[in-house]
Image (cartoon, grey):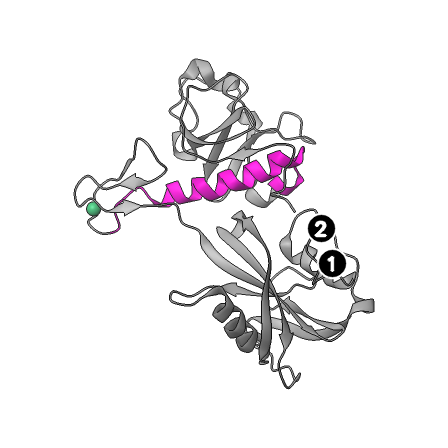
Amino acid sequence: MIHQIAPSVFNNQYKPRTPKPNDYIFIYGQNQALLDCANEKEPRVPTYSDFAEYNPTLTYLFEIDETAFYLLPMAKWPLSGCPDTDKYKPQPIFSFYMIQPGYMAFAGLTAAHIAGWYEKRTICGRCGAKLVHNETERKMDCPECHNEEFPQINPVVIVGVTNGDKLMLTKYANRPITHFALIAGFAEIGESFEECVAREVFEEVGIRVKNIRFYKSQPWAMSGSLLAGFYCDLDGDDKVILQEDELSEGVWVPRGEIPEQDTKIALTAEMIERFRIGKENEPL
Ligand SMILES: [Zn+2]
């Protein structure tokens, strides 16, 4: 999965330090990031050495190994006096999946999650005053009403529903994604992950489940989420009643008919693959 970057180590503690020449600068705004596209085939994330002489105001994001990543909001671009700005082109965040090495793909997506939060947390949601960054941790403080805004993570369940030797696979309605997925949904306020699993399965395909068991989790920046993967078993009638505004298909697929999955990026694909090879109940 994309967040598994060993032997590199991700450290997201908020510990700002003076940038070094090889630290990375993530220029972000409205779900896009500016990459140096001088070489169109290999866009690169700019480094501090590219901009050091223009004295940019940066926000510390995190470290991977000894290299730090900083945020430069798109609103502060272009930097005063900086030449060659034409080579920096906006790229959609999902293009980070293609960047190599793999830890840079994870870094770009994670930076986008944090940067998107900063972008939407400039004004106090309670009193409207301008928020200021706390000096010791990643949070925004209101100097007027003392409201605190912490980074936002939306919890999501990913559910592999098994029916003997078959797995429930779905396709989303009204989305460009055409491959099969698993049942998934955001947790509501006041419910546990397990209750969320049972509710989402019933809402999307109209069946009841039992033996709900946790598999693995994965940070998923594209929806600002932390995914929690569960397997569970059909309980009772296997007749599918599709929630048609969410899904275009929900079908029981025999193990032997499931196509092999690429497990390098997503928890969903790994869970389908573990079932396909008959190892959904074995610890990794
Ligand atoms: Zn306030």
Of all residues shown, which one is farthest toward the front? 283
Q: Secondary structure at mark 2?
A: loop
Q: Position of residue 131 (x, y in %)?
A: 26, 40
Task: Report the magenta residues as a range.
Answer: 96-125
Q: Residue at x 40, y 33 (%)?
A: 14
Amino acid marked by disc 2: Thr
What residue did someone put label 2 on? 263
Which of 276/48 is in front?
A: 276
In the rendered structure, the answer to whether residue 13 lies left or right of residue 254 reads left
Q: Position of residue 25 (x, y in %)?
A: 50, 27
Quarter-of-image position of residue 29 = top left
Badge 2 crowding class, 10 Å Cα cut-off, few under 14, some 14 to 19, many 20 or more, is: some
Task: Answer above or below: position of 61 versus 279.
Answer: above
In the rendered structure, the answer to whether residue 133 lies left or right of residue 129 reads right
What residue did someone put label 1 on? 273
- Overall secondary structure of the magenta stretch? helix
Q: Residue at x 55, y 19 (%)?
A: 22
Question: Given contact means CB atoms under 8 Å apart, are the residues at marks 2 and 1 in contact?
Answer: yes
